[in-house]
Image (cartoon, helix red, strand yellow):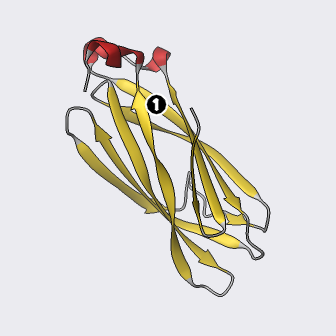
Amino acid sequence: MLFEQKTGDVIVRVQPDYLHDESSPKDDRYIWAYTVEIENLGTSPLKVVERVWNIADSRGQVQCVRGNGVVGEQPVLQPGEVFRYTSGAPLSAPAGMMHGTYKMTDEDGESFDVFIPVFALDSPAQAEFPN
């Protein structure tokens, strides 16, 4: 399932994917990959300078992950450009959700937040452990 949110002239799309081969439900280890696309619909370049992820699982564990840029980069998106990357998240429960923000700067150095949509992390094991 694809999740999408638009903030100003930026669209963020997220596609989560449960990784069966890396997960071990009997050990309470549920591994997810997620692919993100950040699209600049504006008329000037934008730079991704920081990310904040909020990750919650169905057992009530919440974590906040902050860092510079994304996947070790601070990409600059030219007008009309899409930046795409894949990352991952481990959960200790069969379901959860993520959302967050990217701090971006425009060509004048002004910073602003772009919202990352809330997206569900529902593993096949979730059917055995309803929320």
**Secondary structure of the residue carrying numbered label 1:** strand
Q: Quadrant of residue 69?
A: bottom right
Query: Which residue is at 61% across, 70% downward?
Result: 8
The mark total stands at 1
Q: Which residue is mark 1?
A: 32
Classify 10 Å Cα crowding around label 1: few (below 14), some (14-19), many (20 and above).
many
Q: Quadrant of the C terminus?
A: top left
Q: Quadrant of the N terminus?
A: top right
Task: Give 108 or 39, whichever is nearer the viewer.
Answer: 39
Q: Is residue 97 above or below residue 82?
A: above
In the displayed image of the protein, which residue is found farthest to the left?
A: 60
Query: Which residue is at 49% across, 22% downward?
Result: 19
Query: Which residue is at 49% across, 60% downward?
Result: 115
Q: Position of residue 60 (x, y in %)?
A: 20, 38
Q: Is residue 26 above or below residue 131?
A: above
Q: Is residue 78 left or right of residue 62?
A: right
Q: Position of residue 83 (x, y in %)?
A: 69, 54
Q: Is residue 40 left or right of residue 26?
A: right
Q: Position of residue 11 (x, y in %)?
A: 63, 57
Task: Give 43 or 20, whichever is nearer the viewer.
Answer: 43
Amino acid carrying mark 1 in the image: Trp
Q: Is residue 91 above or below residue 82?
A: above
Q: Position of residue 79 (x, y in %)?
A: 78, 68
